[in-house]
Image (tube, rainbow, N blue to C red):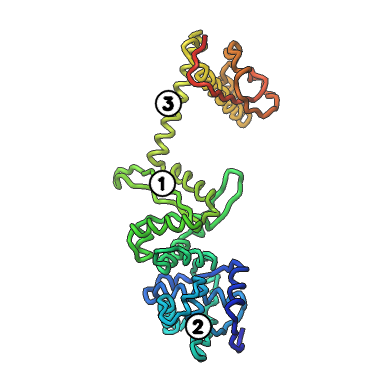
Amino acid sequence: MGNQKPYFMGRKEVLSLLKKNDITLLIPKSLTEDARFSNYAIATYCVLQALHIPTQMDRGCISPQQIAYFLTENADCFKRKSQITNHIQCGLDELLENNIISEIDECQKYYILDCSNLWIDTENDYFSRITFNDVRKIFQVKNINNFLLLRFYITTIGTISNTITVYLVDGDCKTSVVGNLTIDYLAELSGISTRTVIDYSKILEEIGLLYVYRHEDFTLNGEEGIRRLANVYGRLSDKEYVDTFAVNQQKHKDSYRYRESNIEKANSRRRLAQMYQQLLKGKGEKYTRSDIVAIYNYVISENEKYERMYEKDKYEEYLDKIRDTEIFNKYDFLNRELIYVTTNQPVKSPTRRNDYDNKIYFNTEKETLN
């Protein structure tokens, strides 16, 4: 940078640069959260940063028509009375008035600009990280206020937390992948209605720029009453992390559906334990084959649980809780007609009565045993 000559780029050269590289943009929150700057100024800022940061040139020569064209790839921008070009002109004027950029000179319809203030201090400034391809996708959406949609997108991405680390089951982890603000708060932050937040979020999902996990769950609090869990959102590429965080959030907040699910699972385990006792008493004739499979899988799962606990703590009491599986030997269909999911490893524990660590799934509904 420094005292460089203005950099003149032709339209084809610029489009080649923008298309070839998915240019990362760092949009300062001081811009998107400041009422002095319209949606037009933000869109103009995105184009100027996309043009100047990759080239490391702090000076350039550009027209409002070119900026509008780089956003839309629509040649109508060069018509004399183009509305979008007028919007870009307003955006340029705002950036100039507030010293985000400065004008060095004019050459016919072109501005020669000093864009050195477009560089962001990533250590001290707060910003939203997007790409210029994101911007272009937004301006391809039809029948929408593209400028407002862009501002909402930048604001939403800027609320993704950089202090939350999400861990997947396989141990992989990432930071800056989830946001969890309420619709009301996003509306206030963006200066739009809650209805528009909902509509714009769906549009961003449709074009692949956002993923939203919509909680149909709530918490019960004696003082606050019923409180719905806020949606969890992030980039579509981070969908797995968003889903994981949302499910863990239900557990952390002890939500209603999480409680109900636990109660349902507890009732199911209790029912299967009672059915197992009936089998031991010789009263298995009243159960269907699928019932027997469910009981068997329950017993195997419980035995595995107590074996792991014994291996960890060496408490003999855990071995007493392991159930006898010989009662299932008389059900020949367990070996003939079922699909096995097996580790194919012999079980070494002397407490297990079956030969392999199998879980069984049966696909015949309500077939009564003879």
In the image, what residue type sits under mark 1? His
Give the mark, 2 or 3, whose residue is nearer the N terminus. 2
Callout 3 secondary element: helix
Q: Residue at x 50, y 67 (%)?
A: 135
Residue at numbered disc 1: 215
Query: Which label lies toward us, 1 or 3?
Result: 1
At label 3, counting other C-alpha atoms closer than 10 Å, the crowd grade (few under 14, some 14-19, many 20 or more) is: few
Residue at numbered disc 3: 267
Q: Using the image, determine if residue 333 lies above or below residue 109.
A: above
Q: Nearer the viewer, residue 334 or 205?
A: 205
Rendering coords of residue 131 (x, y %): 54, 66
Rendering coords of residue 199 (x, y %): 38, 57
Q: Residue at x 61, y 88 (%)?
A: 4
Q: Using the image, determine if residue 146 lies above or below residue 226.
A: below
Where's the N terminus, which quadrant?
Answer: bottom right
Q: Nearer the viewer, residue 96 or 269?
A: 96
Callout 1 secondary element: loop
In the image, what residue type sits under mark 3? Asn
Residue at numbered disc 2: 63
Query: Which label lies toward us, 2 or 1?
Result: 2
At label 1, counting other C-alpha atoms closer than 10 Å, the crowd grade (few under 14, some 14-19, many 20 or more) is: some
Task: Give the side of residue 141 with respect to residue 11, left or right.
Answer: left
- For residue 299, the mark is none
